[in-house]
Image (tube, helix red, strand yellow):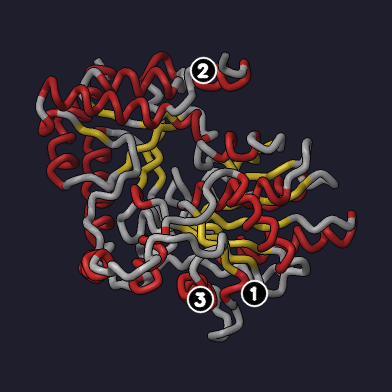
Amino acid sequence: MIAPHIKELITSKGASVIRKMFEEGVALKKLHGEENVFDFSLGNPDLDPPEEVLSAIKDIAQDTSHGVHGYMPNAGYPEARAAMAEKTALEQGLPKGSVKAEHIVMTVGAASALNCVFKAILSPGDEVIVPAPFFAEYRHYVHNYAGILKEIPSKPDFSLDVEAIKAALSPKTAAVLINTPNNPTGKVYTESDITALTDALKAHAAACGRKPYLICDEPYRAIIYDGAVVSPVFLHYNESVIVTSFAKNLSVPGERIGYIAVNPACEDAAEFIAATTFALRVLGCVNAPAFFQKVIARTWNAPCDYSRYQKRRDMLMAVLDKAGIRYARPEGAFYLFCKVPDCFDNGSGDDMAFCDYLKQYFILSAPGSGFGGKGWFRLAYCVSEQTIAGSEKAFCAAMKSLNR
């Protein structure tokens, strides 16, 4: 018998809504032709992996030496951990060598990384604060370990509302979780945002004696536009942690490779790494995929051209402008977060119903409620330019019908 709380989750209207839309899109394409369905539901990168990655895959696949497919230490191959340490130090503005292999745990993507962190730090009833909107699966990741996700609305421009976060901090706060560039809004938090947040966390720790971790989910770090900069956090706050993957920047989401990096200045860094390594093992992952640990150890800094995503962003914004749909201009990632039109359903803002309405025009989107953004919907523009260009007539027809 399926556990009642899981049964409730999988049968709820909002459960896995993005995946459901994606699967509906597959069916619609078979019925009506791929060129007639405009699937913006899933953040599945449309760009191919860089040539350096493809070359490394071919090269490493030729290795038939004895034991090449065996176990390695649960935290990962030493060379992979060392490469991620070098990457982390570079991104965090720290001297080369200041982040070491022992500060890294290789994981099965960023989802595995977050689950390992929450398994390691949460006791029942502990709270994780997250600015809303946020990646929908965060709710489940926190609830997996009997934690409580406290959703704190962002400012109208989707920047951090630090005062609201400060008001939500309590002795039960185990962590604050941020995602920048943000899924679903594309917002990049500024250095002043990060400074204000970390100052608030330091003041809270001094007052109550518990130091919340600052967890930064960064799979879109490299995909930024218009001169935006993803601020480092290690320089601002000792109890900071990076969780990330190569799904988006190297276009290998199916390979499930990521890592955890803890700030070397963290008071319990060694214990944190031991705990997350233990969590990786007991959650059934055992270790990150061996093959792709070797691939990304060689190719983590492979050059990538993200200007194609910026072009697609600009194309889709032009389509929405023509149709009369408002949105938040993204500074990174590959999503547009759009407002449900006021003319829909007498201004109800029902994003679930509006996404169902768009399906009549073969447009697939993701309701904002799943992301903690009621009244909005998300479009993933990591799709072909043909899909974006072809969607113009469908969006305009959908809006014209509403405005009659």
Q: Are marks 3 and 1 in contact (CB under 8 Å)?
A: no
Is residue 321 found left or right of 296 in the rendered image?
Answer: left
Find numbered disc 1 in the image and state the secondary structure of the residue it sits on.
loop
The residue that label 3 is drawn on is: 82
Q: Secondary structure at mark 2?
A: loop
Mark 3 neighbour class, 10 Å CA radius: few under 14, some 14 to 19, many 20 or more:
many
* Residue under numbered circle 2: 12
Q: Residue at x 89, y 57 (%)?
A: 209
Q: Depth-wise, is mark 3 or mark 2 nearer the camera?
A: 3
Percent x, y of residue 26: 22, 28
Amino acid type at mark 3: Ala
Q: Is residue 143 left or right of residue 369?
A: right
* Picture layout, residue 72 above or below residue 355: below
Mark 3 or 1: the one toward you: 3
* Mark 3 vs 2, N-terminal side: 2
Q: Quadrant of residue 56?
A: bottom left
Q: Amino acid at mark 2?
A: Ser
Which amino acid type is marked by label 1? Leu
Task: Find the distance from the CA under tag 3 to the CA under tag 1.
Answer: 20 Å
- Foreground: 73 or 79? 73
Point out the tag, 3 or 1, that comes first from the N-terminus: 3
Image quadrant in which the C terminus is located: top left
Q: Specify the quadrant of the image occupied by residue 205.
A: bottom right
The residue labelled by disc 1 is 235
SS at mark 3 in the image = helix
